[in-house]
Amino acid sequence: MQLIDGKHVASLIQAEIAQEVQNLKEKGQKIPHLAAVLVGNDAPSETYVNGKVKACHNVGFGSTLLRFPDTISETALLAEIEKLNQNPEIDGFIVQLPLPKHIDVVKITEAIDYRKDVDGFHPINVGRMAKNLPAYISATPLGILKLLEYYQIPTVGRHCVVLGRSHIVGSPMSILMARNTPIGNSTVTLCHSKTQNLAEYTRQADILIAAIGIPQFVKADMVKEGAIVIDVGINRIEDTKRKSGFRLVGDVDFEKVAPRCYAITPVPGGVGPMTITALMLNTLLAAQKKVYG
Ligand code: NAD
């Protein structure tokens, strides 16, 4: 069994990005700048945003963190987004999800200038991604593609089963794996909460990508011998031995599933670091105007 080490691959890619920033500096060109919008005090969101700001620092990007209370109105948040759209210093920006219930996430996503939408959530980017046109691919799916590429996991003609159909992970992942691209060309089955006899599908998977948000949901008897398992889940479970009182586990029962696999991502240290790195890649593309010119 091979461990797919996202931390390692992320550090290699981040070193390449840092070198690219150095080259831009030497040529007197603009340094990429990412802004993040954080609304409220959701603890996991704080962690994710801090990780993104830290990654910007590591690769030499400029970063701006805009914090707003969870009482901010939708109108006021839309006005802040428009400011970021117009600000020439900001190459790309993200609005950390989830947002408070009184704010319409679709409205917010669509208000972001698609040319600065480095999260790849805007319908223009989603549509262009689906059509295999240049686009910002959302960070978690892009990070997974980079992992598959690095470990030279064959995808062509393989059966890829994706668990979960969220707009940010499962759904785009299923599209990407089916596209006519070197990392793609899989036969894809997309399973979700209404799928019946789920294990019948997962047992057929050469590549199983789990993104459902249920701790250790995928058990050993749901996985084919020799499968490649990508665990996207990040779930907190109680752990009284830890100071924090919790630990992170994936959607896969790692201990039991790993011995059956050809390769598997751990949680933490698998997809998570790649997500942040993919966001850095998208920001670099935005600064270099490589997607939309
Ligand atoms: P989500 O809650 O938006 O979607 C969950 C999906 O799982 C839904 O489409 C639902 O239909 C499906 N689902 C739920 N129960 C199911 C069941 N019993 N069988 C089959 N499908 C079922 O989740 P999300 O935003 O895609 O996140 C999924 C997980 O991935 C979460 O743990 C989240 O924290 C994690 N995540 C990790 C990263 C990362 O960087 N590693 C990024 C995003 C999300």
Image: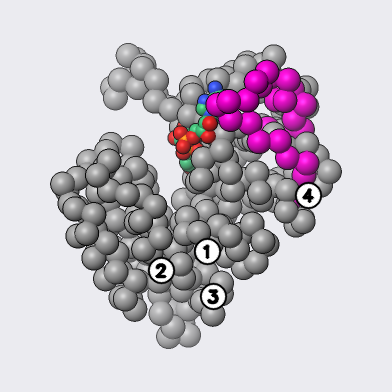
On screen, residue 58 above or below 170: below
**Residue at mark 3 to residue at mark 1: CA–CA distance:** 12 Å
Q: Amino acid at mark 3?
A: Tyr
Residue 267 seen anywhere in this rendered image of the structure: no
Q: Residue 68 shows which numbered tag?
A: none
The residue that disc 3 covers is 292
Residue drawn at (75%, 30%) of the image: 205
Give the amino acid at mark 4.
Answer: Asn
The residue at 51%/52% (across/down) is 139
Q: Alpha-carbon neighbours of circle 4 within 10 Å: few (<14), some, or many (≥20)? A: many
Q: Label 2 vs label 3: CA separation?
A: 11 Å
* Residue 187 x %, y %: 78, 41
Q: Which mark is residue 124?
A: 1
In the picture, the disc for residue 185 is 4
Which region of the structure is painted magenta? 184-208
The residues bearing labels 4 and 1 have C-alpha atoms spaced at a distance of 23 Å
Q: Nearer the viewer, mark 3 or mark 1?
A: 1
Query: Is label 4 or label 2 in front?
Result: 2
Kind of residue at badge 2: Asp
Q: Nearer the viewer, mark 2 or mark 3?
A: 2
Q: Does label 4 or label 2 sit earlier along the sequence? A: 2
Q: Secondary structure at mark 3?
A: loop
Instruction: Give the left or right position of residue 25, taking residue 181 as reference.
Output: left
Contact? badges 2 and 1 (CB < 8 Å): no
Where residue 274 appears, as percent x and y from the top left, is: 53, 47
Residue at (54, 43) in percent of width and height: 169
Report which residue position mark 2 lands on.
113
Q: Quadrant of the C terminus?
A: bottom right
Query: Within 10 Å of the Cα at label 2, are there few (<14), some (14-19), or many (20+) other Cα atoms?
Result: some
Q: Are marks 4 and 1 in contact (CB under 8 Å)?
A: no
**Residue 77 falls left or right of residue 293:** left
Give SS at disc 2: loop
